[in-house]
């Protein structure tokens, strides 16, 4: 057990360092739920060869394996794999449209599909399928225009690319796509493109038959990888690790730490939480409520998405569900920001015009002018009057916005737990991951609340008019910041969803 624990710690540290130092990534570009496709065209003197490559990440592969396992025995044998690969290649071939000078050329299969399952996170499998097609060319025209289009639309997000290269005896005079795949035909994704991966589904070129050698690009397909970097996912490695109380306790602590690191990474509403609680004058109790809501919401979201992946993957594509949740989270932040802006604006109007009568209040009561000091004191009290207390439902809504989009790593843990019959252990790790996120967001809320209270108690500052004006404007500025950030999150989620 001691050796297993030491090995687990060393593995997690090594994986973290490798992720930080790596210059390229074999992991899937948009997470564990992507389906990536490459169309590789090679123009010869008498034929056009097309390789069609599909690279599925762990989550869609998990769903696909449920469909492949026709007899439901939990295994995929050659009698099930071969028909599946043939059907998949037939579907992909039908989605391709190859034209020469505007005329459609039929594609035919020239070899058996190549199907493999590189190792993924936590022992899950990924799927790689390569189909080979060919179209014949007539020798009547020397210079020709070629176009190819991949009309596949399965609802999944992922890397999409098209390349067109030439064999010996053929020269490309122009092309709208590169000759060499940037991802080595979906075996090695460049890191500088992971935030905005290509979505190229068509390409065209003008080629000419030459008397010389000609040709460009690589002819042979890269070898299928045996293992992905995603297999080194530290959270997934916990649920597939050892057994025993010591391992379980350490794994839970590491899951909490990984959840905290996840929340510290860019996004996750840390700035929104701080801005909202500053503007709405939240308390320690509100911060605790926020943390509990984030943990509960994230944990529930992982299980809901897991059920959708298992029971309705053909209808509810996981990344589409995540897209809808991201939009809902952004809209919820917009509503919270707008509410804070309205409350702040009303509070500022109330401070400037107490009683709702403005200056007519003074003229209607001459005795107020006899005591100018009392009159100014009343207005000072109004200026320092706080906004109404933060409603618990708003705190819960903020927690929902921070936790409703489940982590892909947490979903992988659930799937690994299901396949290894360790569902309870996986559920505990997922809860620990959510608690780690909650500790960061809740801790930020506590720090924000304490800092604001300490500033308010600072002697001498609160009596200065400039400081009072600044303090009075904080809720409105915070509300505008939350509203603007919510709009940005919503628009980005809609753009990704589209």
Image: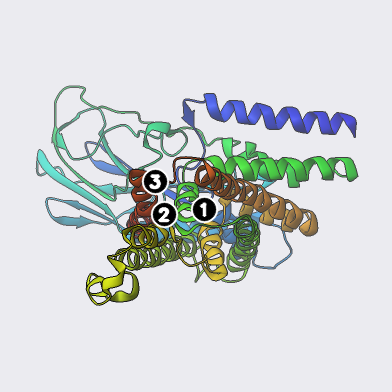
- The local crowd at label 3, few if under 14, some if 14 to 19, many if 20 or more residues have their Cα within 10 Å, is many
In this rendering, position of residue 283 left or right of residue 109: right
Q: Distance between the residues labelled 3 and 2?
A: 7 Å
**Badge 2, how many Cα within 10 Å: few under 14, some, many 20+?**
many
* Residue labelled with disc 3: 159
* Numbered disc 3: secondary structure: loop
Element type at marker 2? loop
CB under 8 Å between discs 1 and 2: yes
Please identify the quadrant where the N terminus is shown. Answer: top right
Residue at image x 73%, y 58%?
418
Whether the residues at callouts 1 and 3 have beta carbons within 8 Å, the answer is no
- Give the distance between the C-alpha atoms of the residues marked 1 and 2, in whole angstroms: 8 Å
Nearer-N-terminus badge (1/3): 1
Nearer to us in this view, 42 or 498: 498
Q: How far apart are marks 1 and 3 (CA)?
A: 12 Å
Question: Could you tell me residue 470's position as x and y percent?
Answer: 35, 47
- The quadrant of the image that shows the C terminus is bottom left
Of the numbered discs in the image, which one, if any, rests on residue 33?
1
Q: What residue lies at 51% left-to-right and 67% top-to-bottom?
A: 394
Q: Position of residue 239 (x, y in %)?
A: 75, 47
Image mark for residue 157: 2
- Asked if residue 171 can be seen in this view, the reply is yes
Q: Quadrant of residue 227?
A: top right
Above or below, 360 against 214 in this view is below
Report the label total.
Answer: 3
Q: Is 325 on the left or on the right of 172, as rendered?
A: right
**Image: 97 above or below 300:** above
Is 420 on the left-hand or right-hand side of 84?
Answer: right
Give the x, y percent position of residue 70. Answer: 64, 67
Q: Mark 2 or mark 1, which is nearer the start of the sequence?
A: 1
Tell me the quarter of the picture where residue 323 sits. Answer: bottom left
């Amino acid at each position: 057990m001691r050796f297993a624990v030491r090995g687990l710690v060393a593995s997690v540290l090594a994986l973290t360092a490798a992720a930080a130092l790596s210059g390229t990534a074999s992991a899937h570009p948009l997470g564990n739920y992507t389906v990536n496709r490459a169309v590789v065209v090679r123009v010869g003197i008498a034929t056009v060869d097309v390789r069609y490559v599909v690279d599925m990440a762990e989550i869609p592969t998990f769903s696909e394996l449920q469909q492949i396992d026709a007899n439901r025995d939990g295994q995929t044998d050659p009698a099930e794999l071969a028909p599946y690969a043939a059907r998949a290649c037939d579907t992909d071939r039908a989605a391709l449209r190859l034209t020469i000078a505007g005329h459609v050329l039929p594609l035919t299969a020239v070899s058996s599909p190549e199907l493999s399952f590189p190792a993924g996170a936590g022992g899950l499998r990924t799927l790689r399928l390569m189909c080979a097609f060919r179209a014949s060319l007539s020798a009547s025209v020397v210079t020709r225009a070629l176009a190819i289009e991949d009309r596949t639309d399965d609802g999944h997000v992922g890397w999409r690319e098209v390349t067109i290269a030439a064999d010996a005896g053929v020269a490309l005079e122009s092309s709208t796509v590169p000759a060499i795949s940037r991802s080595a035909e979906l075996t090695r994704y460049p890191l500088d493109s992971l935030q905005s991966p290509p979505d190229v589904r068509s390409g065209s070129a003008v080629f000419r038959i030459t008397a010389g050698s000609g040709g460009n690009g690589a002819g042979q397909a890269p070898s299928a990888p045996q293992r992905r970097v995603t297999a080194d996912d530290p959270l997934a490695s916990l649920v597939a690790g050892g057994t025993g109380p010591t391992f379980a306790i350490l794994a839970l602590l590491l899951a909490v730490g990984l959840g905290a690191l996840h929340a510290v990474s860019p996004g996750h509403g840390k700035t929104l939480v701080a801005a909202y609680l500053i503007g709405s004058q939240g308390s320690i109790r509100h911060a605790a409520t926020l943390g509990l809501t984030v943990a509960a919401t994230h944990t529930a979201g992982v299980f809901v998405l897991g059920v959708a992946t298992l029971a309705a993957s053909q209808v509810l594509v996981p990344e589409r569900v995540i897209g809808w949740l991201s939009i809902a989270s952004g809209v919820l932040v917009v509503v919270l920001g707008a509410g804070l802006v309205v409350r702040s604006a009303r509070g500022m109007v109330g401070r400037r015009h107490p009683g709702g009568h403005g200056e007519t209040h003074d003229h209607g009561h001459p005795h107020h002018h006899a005591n100018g000091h009392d009159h100014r004191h009343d207005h000072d009290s109004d200026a320092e009057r706080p906004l109404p207390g933060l409603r618990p439902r708003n705190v819960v809504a903020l927690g929902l916005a921070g936790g409703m989009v489940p982590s892909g790593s947490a979903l992988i843990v659930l799937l690994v737990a299901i396949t290894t019959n360790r569902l309870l252990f996986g559920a505990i790790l997922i809860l620990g991951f959510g608690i780690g996120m909650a500790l960061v967001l809740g801790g930020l809320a506590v720090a924000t609340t304490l800092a604001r209270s300490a500033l308010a108690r600072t002697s001498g500052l609160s009596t200065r008019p400039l400081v009072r004006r600044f303090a009075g404007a904080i809720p409105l500025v915070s509300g505008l910041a939350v509203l603007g950030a919510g709009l940005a999150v919503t628009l980005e989620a809609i753009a990704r969803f589209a």
